[in-house]
Image (spheres, helix red, strand yellow):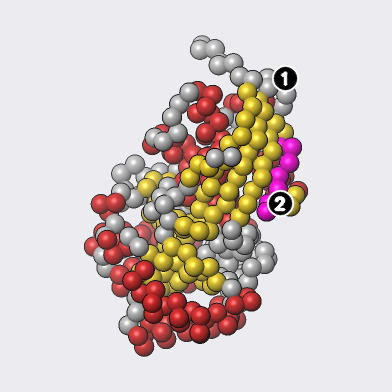
Amino acid sequence: MKPKAPIPEISGQICWESPANIALVKYWGKYSVQLPINPSLSFVLRHSVVKICMDYEIDPKTRLQLLSFSLNDHPREDFASRIQGYLSSLVPWFPFLQHAQIRIRSQSTFPHSAGIASSAAAFSALALCLCSIEAEIKHNTTDGADFLRKASFAARLGSGSACRSVYDGFALWGNTRLLKGSSDEFAVRLDEAMVHSAFHHLKDSILIVDSHKKKVSSSDGHALMQQHPFREKRIEQANRNLETLVLSLKTGDITSFGEIIENEALSLHGLMMSSNPGYILMRPSTIRLLELIRDFRRDTGTHLFFTLDAGPNIHLIYNETDAGNVVPFIRSELAKYCEDGRWIDDSKGGGPRRLVC
């Protein structure tokens, strides 16, 4: 039997910034340990990001401990306990963690726990930090496919959708015949050849209807899919929608693209309302905004579409070339239905980046 490599005694600091992603085909429901019942597809954002700075000391004489965790300069014991559990769960894949003392400072540019994939950004940044420490210990590089695949795998164990945030552009998570190498255990990036130029410069304007923490967490929502009466039909629908969406991305069919992402958004919330117990995350302003968006598209012919994650806030998806029409519409007609008139001007981004600490 090959002897285990000794745990080195090292210390340092590592910082990564990782983006939220917006799912176009939604992942809803899981089995085993954070594995999806259906494949999903998303793209990462440019400005909605979480920055993680991790101070670490690895000493064979100590045991794993998260010494502190802060979010936007405020200690968060509720998040700290979740992160401690996450780090403990990763020891089989990152043996150095069993002897690590860690401090984490986190900064977010957008509301957390409000349905804008804050956990995806946070856990992908955490996973990238851990993979960078491992690379330093093993004297490996941090720019190859194997590095990103392991980061995606590790991010998934913290938050399923986080596995898609380690890549730039579009990413697919879940085993499907549509993409070679796809897996339930990690996400894969869509090659540029699979994406028409019509989708190279997408905008995502996020309408903040309610920035408060959701009353029902995504984890609880996923659990309710186990006994959901529409579970099997949802799996069929998601796979069908994914196939249509991948074809739309390849051919540049913007109309079909919009139809699919709106269908996915409304299906997601329909699943929440029809679960047992059922619940509603949309707000009256959410409904009014959706009506106004559809009216604007009908009246102007602008390719403006919406999607929602598990929350009341709306993502407006459109091409950068249409911003001259869409942004004035947001300011004059939509912002009044947002919390304090707030909305985030975002776009398809370039993925995570390592920062100088």
Q: State yes or no: residue 92 in magenta.
A: no
Magenta residues (range): 66-72
Instruction: From the top left corner, tell me how far across and down residue 128 is, in percent.
Output: 52, 40
Instruction: From the top left corner, tell me how far across and down residue 121 is, in percent.
Output: 54, 51
* Residue reaching furthest to the bottom: 299
Decide if residue 346 is in sight here.
yes
In this rendering, is residue 65 above or below 167?
above
Decide if residue 229 is in sight here.
no
Q: Which sits in the foreground, 217 or 167?
A: 167
Quadrant for residue 264, please give it. Answer: bottom left
Q: In which quarter of the image is the C terminus?
A: top right
Q: Which sits in the foreground, 227 or 55?
A: 55
Q: Name the residue under label 2.
A: 73
Viewer-nearest of labels 2 and 1?
2
Classified by dominant secondary structure, the portion drawn in magenta counts as: strand
Residue type, mark 2 in image: Asp
Figure label count: 2
Residue at the spot 70% in from the left edge and 48% down from the top edge: 70
Q: Give residue 61's mark.
A: 1
| Residue density around tag 2, few if under 14, some if 14–19, many if 20 or more, within 10 Å | few
Quadrant for residue 318, please give it. Answer: bottom left
| Residue density around tag 1, few if under 14, some if 14–19, many if 20 or more, within 10 Å | few
In this rendering, is residue 31 above or below 252?
above
* Residue reaching furthest to the front: 356
Q: Is residue 261 left or right of residue 98?
A: left
CB atoms of marks 2 and 1 within 8 Å = no
Residue type, mark 1 in image: Lys
Report helix, strand or loop for mark 2: loop
Q: Which of marks 2 and 1 is nearer the N terminus?
A: 1
Residue at the spot 51% in from the left edge and 12% down from the top edge: 2
Instruction: From the top left corner, tell me how far across and down residue 195 is, in percent.
Output: 29, 57
Residue at the spot 29% in from the left edge and 51% down from the top edge: 192
